[in-house]
Image: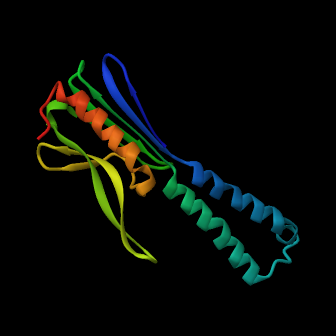
């Protein structure tokens, strides 16, 4: 989910990815509940136990990889670009002068599927030293319009501060 807000001091974009992860987190308790009697009386077969462990571990790993929160702010008042990202176990953050932002764009990321190679897109900020900060994970084509709207709003907001190169 991508949301944008703007006030007198800053333009903020929030990104949250957790819905599919919540569905995955429902699976392990259901699997444990189904096998609870056999676990308690230790009558569970070795193959069933191995399948249960894998069936619990994979959704938890998937949830870990899918839960993600990010927010980034372009503040003319503070002359600051700030970015914060976190998932369940890690955090990243960075603050830079607003003038170090060279471009904001939608970047194509090649992705393969059974139908052949395709593209998904993510929102990135390119700094004046050439480094790229990915602000969102990649989205399929259904989110192109939303990414384009965010890019246009950020470019409009920054156009008053720094010329986009």
Vertical comparison of 152 with 124: above or below: above
Q: Identify which residue, 106 or 18, lies in the foreground.
A: 106
Q: Is residue 101 left or right of residue 19?
A: left
Visible in this render: residue 93? no
Q: Identify which residue, 65 or 10, lies in the foreground.
A: 10
**Residue 11 locus on image (x, y percent):** 33, 27
Q: Residue at x 67, y 70 (%)?
A: 55
Query: Which image quarter holds the C terminus?
Result: top left
> Within the image, what quadrant is residue 97 found in?
top left
> Within the image, what quadrant is residue 150 found in?
top left
Q: Is residue 109 left or right of residue 43?
A: left
Q: Residue at x 73, y 83 (%)?
A: 47
Q: Residue at x 29, y 58 (%)?
A: 108
**Residue 136 locus on image (x, y percent):** 38, 48
Vertical comparison of 43 with 139: above or below: below
Exactly how many numbered labels are in the figure? 0
**Residue 118 locus on image (x, y percent):** 36, 68
Q: Is residue 27 left or right of residue 113?
A: right
**Residue 57 locus on image (x, y percent):** 61, 66
Q: Residue at x 28, y 47 (%)?
A: 124
Q: Is residue 155 left or right of residue 61?
A: left
Visible in this render: residue 7? yes
> Within the image, what quadrant is residue 84 found in?
top left
The way the protein has been coloured in the rendering is: rainbow
């Amino acid at each position: 989910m991508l949301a944008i807000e703007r006030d007198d001091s800053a333009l903020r974009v929030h990104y949250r990815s957790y819905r599919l992860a919540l569905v995955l987190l429902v699976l392990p308790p259901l699997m444990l509940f189904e096998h609870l009697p056999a676990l308690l009386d230790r009558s569970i077969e070795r193959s069933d136990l191995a399948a249960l462990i894998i069936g619990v571990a994979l959704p938890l790993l998937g949830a870990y990889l899918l839960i993600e929160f990010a927010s980034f702010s372009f503040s003319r008042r503070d002359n600051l670009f700030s970015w914060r990202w976190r998932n369940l176990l890690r955090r990243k953050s960075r603050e830079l002068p607003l003038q170090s932002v060279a471009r904001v764009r939608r970047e194509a990321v090649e992705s393969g599927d059974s139908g052949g190679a395709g593209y998904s897109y993510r929102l990135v900020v390119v700094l004046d030293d050439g480094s790229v900060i990915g602000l969102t994970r990649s989205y399929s084509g259904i989110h192109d319009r939303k990414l384009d709207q965010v890019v246009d709003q950020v470019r409009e907001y920054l156009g008053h501060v720094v010329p986009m190169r």
